[in-house]
Image: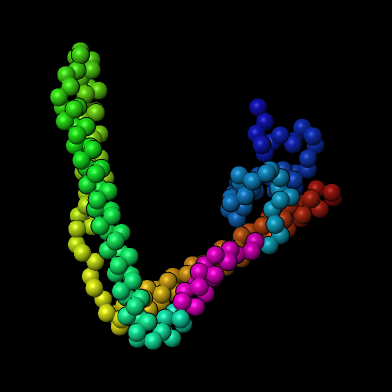
């Protein structure tokens, strides 16, 4: 049975076309593997994604805005963030309390149930352990028990500046890697195209 790569052989595709079709599954072109088939879809130049560049610029803009904020604005921002976080924390605690209560109610019913036959004992045990594991992992509210710390404007601004500087450094590093990967992919494809071209010339002599 022909694969997506070999299907064109019966139609007389060239060696170069076959090689380029197969190249989609390797190295620089692996990200194209699930796209519509055809080596002709492989670009001559791989352009780096601008995701990290945009994210770094966004963080730089936010940092500039932060540094321009008046002390009273920092105080207001700190108060709003505390209120938002604390509201979300208390809401999550209440959600988890209800989830835990529902699970515990169901667990009592499971424990009270008597399997009708020995063949149902495994099912009974599975039903019990699933709920107990869910309570242990999904209902652990330890992360939400501590109240949100109050920060003054200066503390809030310092935390935000540290966060944004970290974000800038991270996205700049990732963008540099993306540029390097794009250049490497382009070089890989160019070397392949050159080698295939040389092979075609050699085959004609």
Percent from the top left, x then y, of residue 113?
Answer: 17, 22
Q: Residue at x 27, y 79 (%)?
A: 152
Q: Is residue 198 visible?
A: yes
Quadrant containing the N terminus is top right
At 25% from the left edge and 48% from the top edge, which residue is drawn?
A: 96
> Nearest the camera: 137 or 205?
137
Instruction: Tell me where the magenta segment starts and ends, as one range.
Output: 46-62
Q: Is residue 48 above or below residue 172?
A: above
Position above or below: 172 against 45? below
Spot occupied by residue 87 in the image (x, y as percentages of width and height):
29, 61
Residue occupying the point 25% across, 40% down: 134
- The x and y percentages for residue 60 are 48, 78
Query: Residue visible at 20% across and 40% down?
Result: 101
Q: Quadrant of residue 79?
A: bottom left
Along the line of sight, which residue is nearer the eye, 38 or 122? 122
Magenta segment: does it hold 158?
Answer: no
Residue 80 rendering spot, x and y as whole percentages = 33, 71
Whether residue 202 sits left or right of residue 95 in the image: it is right
Q: Secondary structure of the magenta portion, mostly?
A: helix
Residue 51: say if magenta: yes
């Amino acid at each position: 049975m022909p694969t997506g790569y070999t299907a064109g052989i019966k139609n007389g595709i060239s060696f170069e076309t076959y090689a380029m079709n197969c190249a989609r599954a390797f190295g620089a072109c692996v990200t194209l593997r699930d796209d519509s088939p055809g080596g002709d879809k492989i670009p001559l130049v791989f352009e780096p994604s601008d995701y990290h560049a945009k994210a770094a610029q966004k963080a730089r803009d936010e940092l500039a805005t932060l540094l321009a904020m008046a002390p009273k604005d920092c105080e207001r921002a700190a108060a709003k963030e505390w209120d938002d976080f604390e509201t979300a924390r208390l809401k999550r605690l209440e959600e988890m309390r209800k989830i835990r209560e529902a699970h515990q109610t169901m667990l009592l019913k499971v424990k009270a149930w008597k399997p009708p036959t020995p063949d149902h004992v495994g099912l009974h045990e599975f039903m019990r352990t699933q709920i107990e594991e869910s309570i242990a992992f999904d209902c652990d509210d330890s992360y939400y028990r501590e109240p949100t710390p109050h920060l003054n404007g200066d503390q809030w601004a310092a935390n935000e500046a540290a966060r944004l500087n970290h974000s800038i450094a991270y996205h700049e590093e990732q963008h540099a890697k993306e540029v390097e990967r794009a250049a490497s992919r382009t070089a890989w494809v160019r070397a392949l195209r050159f080698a295939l071209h040389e092979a075609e010339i050699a085959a004609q002599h």
